């Protein structure tokens, strides 16, 4: 099942996720939905709040291969090192991107899909995805990681794009073509 992706300024994107107390069938179905939604949107990561769920779950697929996704429940970043600056965007804030500085290497922890504790090191794209998605689970969006003036510019552009899309949806063209 593919779920709609929640867009800014929905308040669920700014709330801290709730830890998953137990891996149930409902949680497994949510994970399946998250994976399908991430692939359908051509994303490389997705946090549960991006599909309107309050649970602390993230999925990542840096290589885009189905069946090889990383699932991390109650995720946290234990250690960060190095610096990396690269372009970043978000499925919940579509149409904008910016250079964002993040840690080059991270040590992440949480539970896997079976509920087993896992800790692992990541670098490169996976490290960036984990930091981005953990930010979501903490109630933060990537524009918060850029300067005040850059953030204002990004959000103004996003607002303009959103207003344009909303007018197009409300007033579809009647011409055929």
Image (cartoon, helix red, strand yellow):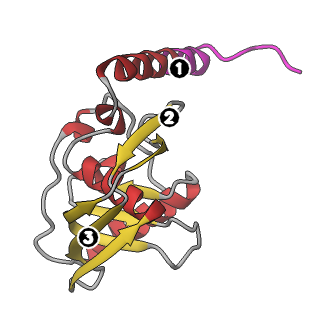
Left or right: 114 in relation to 7: left
- In the displayed structure, 69 sits above or below 134; it is below
Question: Between disc 3 and disc 1, whose residue precedes?
Answer: 3
Classify residue 104 by image quadrant: bottom left
Which residue is denoted by mark 3 in the rendering? 107
**Neighbour class for label 2 at 10 Å: few (<14), some, many (≥20)?**
few
* Residue drawn 46% across the image and 63% down it: 124
* Residue drawn 24% across the image and 61% down it: 80
Which residue is denoted by mark 2 in the rendering? 94
* Residue drawn 38% across the image and 62% down it: 127
* Residue drawn 29% across the image and 65% down it: 106
Q: Can residue 166 be seen here?
A: yes
Which residues are drawn in magenta? 161-177
Q: Nearer the viewer, residue 19 or 152?
A: 152
Distance between the alpha carbons at the discs numbered 2 and 3:
28 Å
Q: Is residue 168 magenta?
A: yes
- Residue 125: x %, y % from top left: 47, 60
Local secondary structure at mark 3 = strand
Q: Residue furthest right?
A: 177
- Residue 1: x %, y % from top left: 48, 62
Distance between the alpha carbons at the discs numbered 1 and 2:
9 Å
**Neighbour class for label 3 at 10 Å: few (<14), some, many (≥20)?**
some
Quadrant in which the C terminus appears: top right
- In the displayed structure, 26 sits above or below 14; it is below
Which residue is denoted by mark 1 in the rendering? 161
Q: Residue furthest front?
A: 82
Is the residue under label 2 in contact with that under label 1 (CB below 8 Å)?
Answer: yes
Classify residue 23 by image quadrant: bottom left
For residue 71, the mark is: none
Left or right: 23 in relation to 47: left
- Residue 6: x %, y % from top left: 38, 40
């Amino acid at each position: 099942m593919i779920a709609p992706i929640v867009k800014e300024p929905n308040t669920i994107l700014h709330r801290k996720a709730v830890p998953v107390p137990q891996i149930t069938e409902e949680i497994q179905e949510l994970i399946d939905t998250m994976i399908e939604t991430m692939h359908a949107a051509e994303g490389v990561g997705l946090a549960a709040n991006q599909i309107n769920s309050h649970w602390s779950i993230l999925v990542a697929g840096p290589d885009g291969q189905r069946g090889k996704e990383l699932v991390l429940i109650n995720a946290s970043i234990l250690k960060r090192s190095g610096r990396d600056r690269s372009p970043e965007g978000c499925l919940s804030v579509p149409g904008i991107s910016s250079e964002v500085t993040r840690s080059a290497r991270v040590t992440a922890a949480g539970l896997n899909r079976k509920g087993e504790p896992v800790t692992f090191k990541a670098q490169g794209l996976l490290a960036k995805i984990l930091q981005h998605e953990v930010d979501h689970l903490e109630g933060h969006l990537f524009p918060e990681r850029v300067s005040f003036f850059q953030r204002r510019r990004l959000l103004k552009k996003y607002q303009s794009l959103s207003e344009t899309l909303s007018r197009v949806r409300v007033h579809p063209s009647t011409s055929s073509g």
